[in-house]
């Protein structure tokens, strides 16, 4: 007795094949899009008070080393100096050739900014600004020119507000802020959002596949055919 005698076919249904192909194509497309590198910035503005040390938390996602790339922090709203005939671009912080380049830095930020050197190996491009002043209020832009992505930069807004004596919860020094986690921390914290979505898609696909196979397996036509085959196989007395 073979499988066909019981009313089943080992060849998958064309509907199942088409459905499987569509889901796999969508899964591959989603993984490719999610796998592209891009600069991620905070969704909310950063608030600090004069004299605080503040961290502008940026990172590259998926996490990848940027220690060998150029990282440019600038003020996009800053107008060029009219006295500068060369119209040179000045930066809040410029990291190039695995080191800081202070020669092209805005004078007011000399000695007041730094990157997390070890964090660069894990995609952490956060900028620390020490002794914040009211002049620091505004937008900050982080740009990685040679990042293999269509999204090579992002912008965050920094608000600098004076501390009020009537404020019940005064601002805490921003030097205690924690930048984005490294790969080791992410591994301990759980799966990334990309991996979670992929797992969910796979589980849903398998569930739908089981339902489709069950519907086809126990359809009235299939059951009737199976019963007829069994009656034929039963020996007559």
Image (cartoon, helix red, strand yellow):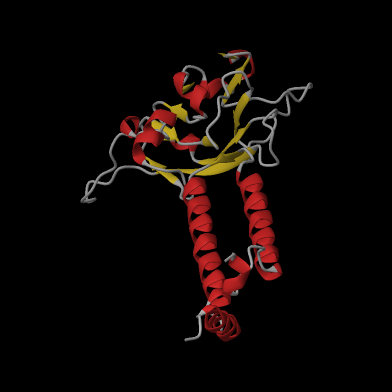
* Residue at the image point whose x is 47% and y is 21% from the top: 114
Q: Is residue 149 above or below residue 18?
A: above
Residue 18 shown left or right of residue 8 in the figure: right
Instruction: Locate residue 217, reporting x and y percent.
Output: 55, 74
Q: Nearer the viewer, residue 13 or 62?
A: 13
Instruction: Locate residue 189, reporting x and y percent.
Output: 35, 39
Q: Nearer the viewer, residue 120 or 25?
A: 25
* Residue at the image point whose x is 44% and y is 28% from the top: 129
Q: Nearer the viewer, residue 222 or 91?
A: 222
Residue 23 shown left or right of residue 174 in the figure: right
In the orientation shown, which residue stands out farthest toward the front?
237
Tell me if residue 234 can be seen. yes
- Quarter of the view holding residue 105: top right
Q: Is residue 32 above or below residue 223?
A: above
Tell me if residue 112 can be seen. no
Instruction: Locate residue 92, reporting x and y percent.
Output: 56, 27
* Residue at the image point whose x is 58% and y is 14% from the top: 98
């Amino acid at each position: 007795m073979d499988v066909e005698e019981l009313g089943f076919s080992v060849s998958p249904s064309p509907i199942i094949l088409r459905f499987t192909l569509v889901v796999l194509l969508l899964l591959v497309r989603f993984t490719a899009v999610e796998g592209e590198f891009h600069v991620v910035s905070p969704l909310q503005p950063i608030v600090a008070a004069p004299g605080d040390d503040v961290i502008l938390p940026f990172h590259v996602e998926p996490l990848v080393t940027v220690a060998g790339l150029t990282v440019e922090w600038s003020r996009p709203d800053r107008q060029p100096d009219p006295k500068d005939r060369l119209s040179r671009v000045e930066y809040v912080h410029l990291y190039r050739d695995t080191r800081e380049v202070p020669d092209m830095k805005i004078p007011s930020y000399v000695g007041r900014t730094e990157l997390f050197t070890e964090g660069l190996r894990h995609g952490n491009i956060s900028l620390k600004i020490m002794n914040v002043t009211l002049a620091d209020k505004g937008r900050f832009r982080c740009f990685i020119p040679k990042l293999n992505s269509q999204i090579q930069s992002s912008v965050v807004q920094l608000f600098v507000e004076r501390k009020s004596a009537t404020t019940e919860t005064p601002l805490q020094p921003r030097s205690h802020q924690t930048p984005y986690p490294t790969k080791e921390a992410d591994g301990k914290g759980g799966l990334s959002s990309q991996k979670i979505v992929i797992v969910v898609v796979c589980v849903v696909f398998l569930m739908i596949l089981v339902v489709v196979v069950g519907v086809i397996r126990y359809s009235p036509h299939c059951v009737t055919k199976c019963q007829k085959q069994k009656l034929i196989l039963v020996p007559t007395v």
